[in-house]
Image (cartoon, grey):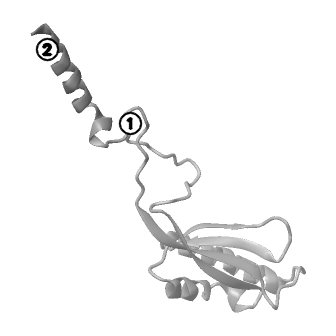
């Protein structure tokens, strides 16, 4: 009888092991799950009317460009923007959160530097984790987990 109990216990142990049910090894960390969405990556290049000279006109266009960035950010359409610092034709990027490529294009076409021909854009759909953001100075991420 004692031998039967040992065999039964061994059998029960084997059956109750997660691997015997085809489950993952419980010692492995659970992969994080992300909700994904499409953003629009905008590459800003020197336009046909780009010039390195600083004039009152180019300064006004640059001021309008920065105001447009602030406006789009405040509207929640632009979540990341910044220049490249190497002085080459690729001048900067935007990451936009819009409903469509057409909306991203329309918003880029409101930029004074694009309108003036100092910048031109190339837009690519980009798939990433939903909710990506840039923190403002003094903000911090709170992790509830």
Q: Position of residue 63 (x, y in %)?
A: 71, 77
Which residue sits at x=75%, y=90%? 117
Tell me which numbered mark, 2 or 1, is placed earlier along the sequence.
Answer: 2
- Assign a secondary structure to mark 1: loop
Q: Position of residue 30 (x, y in %)?
A: 40, 42
Q: Position of residue 83 (x, y in %)?
A: 74, 68
Q: Position of residue 127 (x, y in %)?
A: 52, 68
* Furthest residue in direction top, as rendered: 2
Badge 1 crowding class, 10 Å Cα cut-off, few under 14, some 14 to 19, many 20 or more, is: few
Q: Which mark is residue 25?
A: 1
Q: Is residue 19 above or below residue 70?
A: above
Which residue sits at x=61%, y=88%? 109
Left or right of 46: which side holds 126?
left
Q: Which mark is residue 77?
A: none
Q: Is residue 32 above or below residue 11?
A: below
Q: Is residue 111 visible?
A: yes
| Residue hosting label 2 | 5
């Amino acid at each position: 009888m004692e031998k039967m109990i040992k065999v039964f216990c061994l059998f029960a142990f084997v059956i109750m092991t997660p691997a015997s049910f085809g489950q993952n090894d419980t010692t492995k960390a659970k992969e994080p799950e992300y909700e994904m969405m499409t953003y629009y990556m905008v590459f800003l290049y020197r336009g046909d009317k780009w010039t390195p000279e600083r004039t009152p006109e180019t300064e006004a266009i640059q001021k309008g460009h920065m105001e447009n960035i602030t406006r789009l950010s405040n509207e929640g359409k632009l979540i990341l923007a910044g220049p490249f610092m190497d002085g080459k034709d690729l001048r900067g990027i935007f990451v936009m959160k819009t409903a469509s490529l057409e909306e991203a294009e329309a918003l880029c076409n409101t930029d004074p530097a694009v309108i003036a021909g100092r910048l031109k854009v190339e837009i690519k759909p980009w798939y990433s984790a939903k909710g990506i953001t840039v923190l403002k100075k003094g903000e911090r991420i709170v992790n509830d987990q």
